[in-house]
Amino acid sequence: MSGSERTRPVPRRTFVLGTAAAAGSAALAGPLAAPASAAAFGWSDDGSNYVVDTGAALVFKVSKTTGDLTSLVYRGTEYQGYGGMNSHIESGLGSSTVTIAQSGSTILVSVTHGTLKHYYAARSGENNVYLWTHKADASVSATRYIVRVKAGLFLNDQPDSYTYTTSTIEASDVFAKSDGQTRSKHYSGLRVIDYSHIGWTNGGVGLWIVRSNHEKASGGPFYRSLLRHQSADGGGLYEILYYGQNQTEEQRFGLQGPYVIAFTDGGAPSSALFPGTLTTPWADSLGISGYVAASGRGRVAGVGITGRDTAHPYTVGLANAAAQYWGAARPSDGWFSIAGVLPGTYTLTVHKSELAVFSTQVTVTAGGTTTLNSIAIPSSNDPGNASAIWRINDWTGTPSGFKNADLMTYAHPSDVRAAAWTGNVVIGSGSETSAFPCYLWKDVNSGLLVYFRLTAAQAAAAHVLRIGVTTAYANGRPQVVVNDTWTSAVPAPPTQPGTRSLTNGSYRGNNHTFTYSVPASAWLTDTGQYNVLKINVVSGSGTTSYLSAGTSIDAIDLLN
């Protein structure tokens, strides 16, 4: 793959963040606007469902026995329905207690199933359905909400679509087209921090899920998960409450939401619905389980961050067992502000791109602002600051820049668009990074060779070799051989997720640095000769090909 191909932009998708559509459109009425005059606003009972008319262009139904969303009619067209199934939590809760109440310009449908509570809310004059899900414990399975959409309304051929193929190449969810391109519902190409809404538009109608702030989700700002899919049977839009695939954190419990099903006239949903922007004072008194109003939340602010590498973005995250939040550090000085935080003590982590380079503890109080003085990142916290004889790629906690890295978040490694996973690397060639594959597998490209020269002084000394990884599959980890004369010990496997990752669009796991102390006796003393570093992938688990033991590479360097 050439350098220009390697840096090509991700193909444009209809769910990528966009500007808000015209604020004057009734279809885009925001939650902060005064309720529109809606003579038809209200609810009725058809015997099997509660029928909610928003008084705008949307009428939806909720089953009185299961809490499923059984109908979504917008401008007279039914959008709900995929494979004969409803829209619901997980694959449906089954028998539940369902009630409905109206308070002025708000209607709330409440669903109780064991310890789980789920809510649908409508506002007069809005084409939105607001949803909350309160999962109190693990006794009820609830890891997602799925909006099931009728076939033929928004057909496309994006990476997360498999409308045009039935050729399964992995598990039951990765497919190959006849042209060699791959498709899977996992291939969104987006991290949580990258999107506020997902969905489709056909020009005249847009159907979207606007995600919640994910304070009760897990995995942090860089987590990747399935967001939507499309097939011949219909489509699905997801709000992921917890997803065990390539997960680095335990499940959190409590109230997640609101997340919003939003219809528009074809444009993006109103930015007033986006996480960090949406305010719901109208919901403060509805009695939603676990609901904490803005007055019961606090804020963390930092005046700046020093010691940054300004070539990379920085993100500040807050996390404890109960909640997670994040915010961008301002490029000019590192200033940040994270609002809407539940009271408690959190670990604050500063990330250089996706690499953690600083952490401390902060305490948040209701109605208060925790203000931090300038954070100074110690130079030693960033491995990129170490003096190196040579280095391949920047230390960012991601494989970005390596061969095929841009493709792997929305395609399978076997995709026809991927450059060859094999091939050697020569230090000093100018193409070290683009020639080095982002992933290494035991059964695909183990034994990769890196050629480099040393000066006489460098060859006379021992050196430390470092290999940074971002995740691993089946305990895949690098063992190195130098000049076929010195072989490192097999390193212990770090803690990593136990599920698929490299083949379903995610390199995000637990960043880890392997270090190897290479003795001077391993180097060639002839400065005109290339030293040869061989990187093998070792593990006793995994299967074959791209499901053999593997790992994702962050950076590699040989220190002075």
Image (cartoon, grey):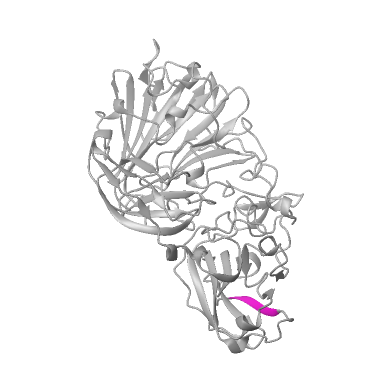
Q: Is residue 94 left or right of residue 234?
A: left
Count up the numbered dots: 0
Residue 291 lies, in percent from the top left, at 27, 37
Q: Is residue 543 magenta?
A: no
Res. 517 visible in picture: yes
What's the residue at 75%, 55% (across, down)? 2
Q: Is residue 108 left or right of residue 424?
A: left
Q: Nearer the viewer, residue 36 or 112?
A: 36
Compared to residue 380, the image places residue 242 above or below, namely above
Instruction: Verify whether residue 533 appears in magenta.
Output: yes
Q: Is residue 29 above or below residue 302?
A: above
Horizontal relation, residue 86 to residue 215: left or right: right
Residue 62 quadrant: top left
Location of the N terminus (image quadrant):
bottom right
Most extreme residue toward the right is 179
At 57% from the left edge and 84% from the top edge, which residue is drawn?
461
Instruction: Give the main secondary structure, helix, strand or loop, of the magenta stretch.
Output: strand
Residue 60 at what x, y percent from top left?
Answer: 44, 25
Nearer to us in this view, 432 or 223: 432
Relative placement, left or right, of 200 versus 192 is right
- Residue 80 seen in this snapshot: no
Extreme residue toward the front, this view: 457
Q: Position of residue 181 (x, y in %)?
A: 71, 50
| Magenta stretch bounds | 531-537
State the residue at coordinates (37%, 22%).
Answer: 32
Residue at the location (66% across, 62% down)? 433
The percent position of residue 439, horizontal first and vertical second, equals 62, 64
Q: Quadrant of the C terminus?
A: bottom right
Residue in the foreground of this view, choosing between 57 and 557: 557
